[in-house]
Image (cartoon, rainbow, N blue to C red):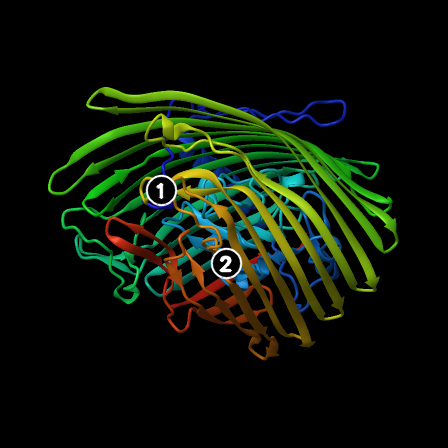
Amino acid sequence: MPGSGTRNSGPGHGLPQCPTELALTLFGKQDMSYSINCTSARWHQKLYKGLMAAGVLVSCSAHADTTVAKNNTTAPKAAKEHLEVVGVRQPRRLDQMGTSGQFVTGTQLRQKQVRDTNDLARVLPGVQIQSSGSFLFPAITVRGITSAQDLYHPATTFYVDDVPVLPINAMQSLIGIESVQLLRGPQAALYGQSAEGGVIDMTTRQPGPRAHASFEAGAESRYGYHVTGTADGSLIKDWLYGSIALTSQEQQGNVSNPATGSRRLGGFESRGGRATLRLAPTDRPWELAFTVDGACSYGSQDVYVGFNNLRDRQVASVVPGTPDPRLSRCGYDESLHGIYHFDGWKLSAIASWQESDISRSFPYYSYISTQPEQWSANTQELRFGTEGKHRFFDLVTGFYHQTTYQDRTSQTAAYVPSYIPYPLTTSHNRAETVALYGNVYWHILKNLDLGLGGRLSRDMSSIAFNSTYGGQTLYAGNRSRNQNMSLGNVSLDYEALPGWHLHGRVSQGYKPAGFNYAPTSIADATSYNPERELSYEIGTVYRYKKFFVRAGYFYNNLQNEQVYVGPAGYQTIASAARAHASGVEGEIQWEFKPGWVIGADGNRTLSKFDSFNDGAGNSYAGLRMPYVPEFMVAGHFSTRFQTGFGRIEPGLDLRVTGPQYFDIANQLKQPTYTQLDLRTTWSFGNRYEVMVYAHNVTDKLYRTYAFTGPAGNVAQISFGRTVGFDLKVAIGNSNQ
């Protein structure tokens, strides 16, 4: 199989049984700690009970204080200022970052029906997010750097509330998201490994003193639906606050399988929830927030059509007697955040636990492969920095520690005409990272800032593997590897004129060394080397009243690029390539009259292998890197006008994606394609809202993933035209 079927294995031995030990120590006279014990077999029971308890408390609070905000078509001043700030770890205005960033509000996400991470490309210019065999692994591409070459160590990292998301959980529903921030380019100094392309940091709504509740429901063509409910408010006045969010969504696919009679493969369904308790006494300089969330997703795994037969919407290589592909994933997260403020400084501490159980099986030709996996990660971070604007410098420094476990079992069997099992491979993988980091912005002059950042990291990885057949051990072994890494960045930001900023940045990124998760032999268990990136960026940002423009140039140089080599179904990761990606990008937005906004964004990227030999005598030097569109261009328009029946807000989005390849040999190509989205929102004050929309109006089908397998060239295709409506009812004031 291709990337999603690339070998990464392991049983459940060695996986911590969640005693989750979350400990947080704050400055002061007392130490505050939290500890929770659980077992992976009962995580769903704990989640259900926790969500129900929080829901009762929060709903009671919301019922006691339900004030409806007055109709206001303009955002509060504080909100407008907030829109210009990015960087959770070191907040700065967009035009003062020294690099390129993006800030998207929860309202903007809702306006464009962004309900999961796969939809974020609609609101993040220059970002491509596509499925890669299944919803487990999104292929994310930013500035010519793509995660499709190593799905288990994505080049662009997702964060939720400043906690790194397990790669296996990257594709997830967005529940109660208040904002999404994108930082383009390597972010290793503050965010560490696997942040070569950038970081997407999502922030959830934190409960506050004002009660707020909302309910949202909608339906789409192809039998899709979504339902979301949220509530938050005060549980103990001026002391304790709580929130709860629940969601359920389903989207049927558009691929049929004549062998089984199934007609709606390629879709998914997901259900999840999140509950937060926030202890924030008004007369104290500290606060604590504990969050628990979980979700289960079900769908099709590896649903492919013939590469040149997209309109048939029929599974390729149909073999009667083989079942439909299937995939299920259940994940559970808990985190504890603490903040202490004193004399213009802030101390932050984060502890989190994540786990995920995956079951998947997928047929290909006359064979079937099953690959259950269990993942867990334990993360601690302590961060110390300045806050406010009264100093001549902004500083943040911290300590980071994360341990990740992955266990996987992998077995392929001949399925037709009879079931004949092949060898069973299991593996247990462990990765640990310990790091010290820091970043400072020095205000050299009133209009000139110098940024310096660095990170010292030690990465430790190990694998234990075993392959058996007929009760006999074919091969087994243990491997480990440690490495030290030092990285840095330097940036300049110059305000040439009021509202006009020029910036430049040189930064480093990396992905650690590691092992193929499911080696097929002793020789295959050798490690691959760390990947390193050196990136250069120059750009400008200009803002004047309702006019905004951004432009820039980037150049990324990759050493020891980690890429998949070998035939589909037997791919391994090798650090075999040197490559570069360069390009230009820009964005413009103009509110030419109140409520009337027009904008455009685009980029052109050249990405090539400078040297690359796959070990079998094949050279790919000079060829384009896969999953990197040659260009992306988008146009946006929205307006707003008041009527006697409420406020109406129509809008459209037009996106053109240039040609790209899906393989290192540049044989499988997706030509340029265009997508048109339309929407209209009808609002009654701030309480009721009805939205009607159509995505991919022209019903354009395009390939999102492709490879050459036993049945020839196959591809995964996009959804066709989707038409839907959405209803939202809100109670209370969302502004804290």
Amino acid type assigned to the residue bearing label 2 in the image: Val
Q: Which residue is found at the position 60% from the left and 75% from the top?
A: 639
Which mark is nearer the camera, 2 or 1?
1
Q: State the SS at label 1.
A: loop
Decide: few, some or many residues near mark 2? Use Cα within 10 Å; few <14, some 14-19, many ≥20. some
Whether residue 201 is visible here, answered yes or no, is no
Say if 537 sits above or below 157 in the image: below
Where is mark 1, residue-wise?
Answer: 566
Q: State the SS at label 2.
A: loop
Decide: few, some or many residues near mark 1? Use Cα within 10 Å; few <14, some 14-19, many ≥20. some
Residue 114's label in the rendered image is 2
Could you tell me which quadrant the N terminus lies in?
top left
Q: Which residue is found at the position 64% from the left and 48% from the top?
A: 535
Kindly give the residue lying farthest to the left in the view shown. 417
Pick the front one: 727 or 301:
301
Please indicate whether residue 354 sits to the left or right of residue 313 in the image: right
Query: Where is residue 133 shown, x and y percent of the image?
Result: 36, 49
Kindly give the residue lying farthest to the right in the view shown. 445
The image quarter containing residue 296 is top left
Please indicate whether residue 195 sits to the left or right of residue 32 in the image: left
Whether residue 641 is visible here, answered yes or no, is yes
Query: Where is residue 251 shown, x and y percent of the image?
Result: 36, 57
Query: Where is residue 117 shown, x and y percent of the image?
Result: 49, 52
